[in-house]
Image (tube, rainbow, N blue to C red):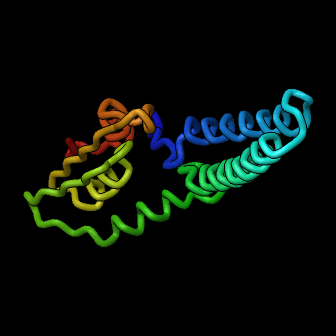
């Protein structure tokens, strides 16, 4: 069984941004290119507003997509893996010591630190909000088991 550390930029956030960009572009076309509104001040103002929103949403979507690719734990760039392993190198706890990972997400850092400190115990906590719906305690436990780590909670 392989661990599933998920992505720090969830697909749902990327998709939500893409949908927002699509809706704003659709509204730009409706208000700017159709005879729905007569030519004049209101149509011009709405066209400018939706053009600006469309550009901002498109740029934000592109940025989120690039972040999604960069932070893929198993993808080409593996930036999250590099960050986690680099931080874990600096965590040294004494035998019977305790480590607390606040905001543990899918447990990657908690598990990496536990592997490097087998005589210590690690606890990972998170609020696991709706924006990271695929992250939860059960996933952390599953990842610990997949990595063969027994000193995590």
Picture layout, residue 59 above or below residue 87: above
Task: Residue at 34% x, 37% y: name it.
Answer: 128
x, y percent for residue 73: 53, 50
Task: Residue at 60% x, 55% y: name it.
Answer: 67
Considering depth in this image, is 44 or 27 the residue closer to the camera? 44
Task: Residue at 15% x, 52% y: name it.
Answer: 121
Q: Residue furthest top?
A: 36
x, y percent for residue 101: 25, 54
Q: Is residue 75 visible?
A: no
Taking the image as shown, residue 75 lies to the left or right of residue 7, namely right
Specify the quadrant that holds the C terminus.
top left
Task: Residue at 74% x, 46% y: name it.
Answer: 54
Considering depth in this image, is 143 or 138 the residue closer to the camera? 138
Quarter of the image holding residue 125? Answer: top left
Taking the image as shown, residue 61 lies to the left or right of residue 142, namely right
Quarter of the image holding residue 28? Answer: top right
Could you tell me how many numbered marks the image carries? 0
Picture layout, residue 96 above or below residue 45: below
Considering depth in this image, is 41 or 96 the residue closer to the camera? 41
Taking the image as shown, residue 1 lies to the left or right of residue 128, namely right
Considering depth in this image, is 51 or 148 the residue closer to the camera? 51
x, y percent for residue 59: 71, 54
Q: Is residue 46 visible?
A: yes
Specify the quadrant that holds the N terminus.
top left
Q: Residue furthest bottom?
A: 90
Picture layout, residue 36 above or below residue 18: above
x, y percent for residue 130: 41, 33
């Amino acid at each position: 069984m392989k661990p599933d550390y998920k992505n720090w930029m969830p697909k749902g956030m990327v998709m939500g941004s893409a949908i927002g960009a699509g809706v704003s572009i659709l509204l730009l076309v409706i208000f700017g290119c159709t005879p729905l509104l007569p030519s004049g001040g209101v149509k011009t103002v709405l066209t400018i507003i939706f053009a600006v929103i469309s550009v901002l949403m498109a740029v934000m979507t592109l940025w989120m997509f690039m972040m999604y690719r960069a932070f893929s734990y198993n993808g080409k760039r593996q930036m999250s893996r590099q960050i986690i392993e680099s931080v874990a190198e600096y965590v040294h706890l004494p035998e019977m010591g305790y480590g607390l990972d606040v905001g543990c997400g899918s447990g990657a850092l908690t598990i990496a630190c536990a592997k490097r400190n087998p005589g210590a115990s690690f606890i990972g906590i998170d609020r696991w909000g709706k924006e990271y719906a695929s992250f939860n305690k059960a996933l952390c436990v599953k990842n610990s088991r997949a990595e063969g780590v027994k000193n995590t909670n």
